[in-house]
């Protein structure tokens, strides 16, 4: 079962977690993270959009996955942005100060357009 869908958009990649990530154990989530990181290492994108539109909330295990993706992409000179975060996730990002780490966009289309315009 793929809980994260990866889509290439030229030099950009969109990662879309499914709603099921909200209920996964840390072990299952980390296993899925390894699959994603392996794919990203094989062909590092210039930028990654993490589309959170299907996720209503998440905990520390998911934050760990986000940080691992961020670290890998930054090591390769890329950028990570978030899209489609709902109110609860936006509040969590503010409480943890992670909103200072990632630019957030209203939706995937805005994020892709913002990254293309930033070139």
Image (cartoon, rainbow, N blue to C red):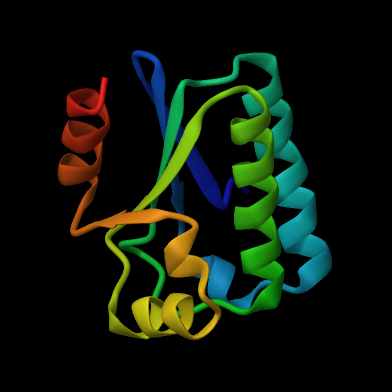
Image check: 28 left or right of 117?
right
Q: Eyeballing the image, is 63 above or below 41? A: below
Q: Eyeballing the image, is 6 above or below 53? A: above
For the point 38% across and 84% down, the residue is 91
Image check: 31 left or right of 67?
right
Question: Residue 58: x and y, percent?
Answer: 54, 77
Q: Eyeballing the image, is 6 above or below 3? A: above
Q: Nearer the viewer, residue 22 or 59?
A: 59
For the point 77% across and 42% down, the residue is 34
Q: Eyeballing the image, is 72 above or below 85? A: above
Q: Nearer the viewer, residue 78 or 16?
A: 78
Image check: 52 left or right of 76?
left
Question: Residue 1: x and y, percent?
Answer: 62, 48
The part of the image, by quadrant, that contains residue 28 is bottom right
Q: Nearer the viewer, residue 114 or 36?
A: 114
Question: Residue 55: x and y, percent?
Answer: 41, 69
Q: Quadrant of the C terminus?
A: top left
Q: How many badges with numbers are in the image?
A: 0
Image check: 61 left or right of 87?
right
For the point 29% across and 75% down, the residue is 86
């Amino acid at each position: 079962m793929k809980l994260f869908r990866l889509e290439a958009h030229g030099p950009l990649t969109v990662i879309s977690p499914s709603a099921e990530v909200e209920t996964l154990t840390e072990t299952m989530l980390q296993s899925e993270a390894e699959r994603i990181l392996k794919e990203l290492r094989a062909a590092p994108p210039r930028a990654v959009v993490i589309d959170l539109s299907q996720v209503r909330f998440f905990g520390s295990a998911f934050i760990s996955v986000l940080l691992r993706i961020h670290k890998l992409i930054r090591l390769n000179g890329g950028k990570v942005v978030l899209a489609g975060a709902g109110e609860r996730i936006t509040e969590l990002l503010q409480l943890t100060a992670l909103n200072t780490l990632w630019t957030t966009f209203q939706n995937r289309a805005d994020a892709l357009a913002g990254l293309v315009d930033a070139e």
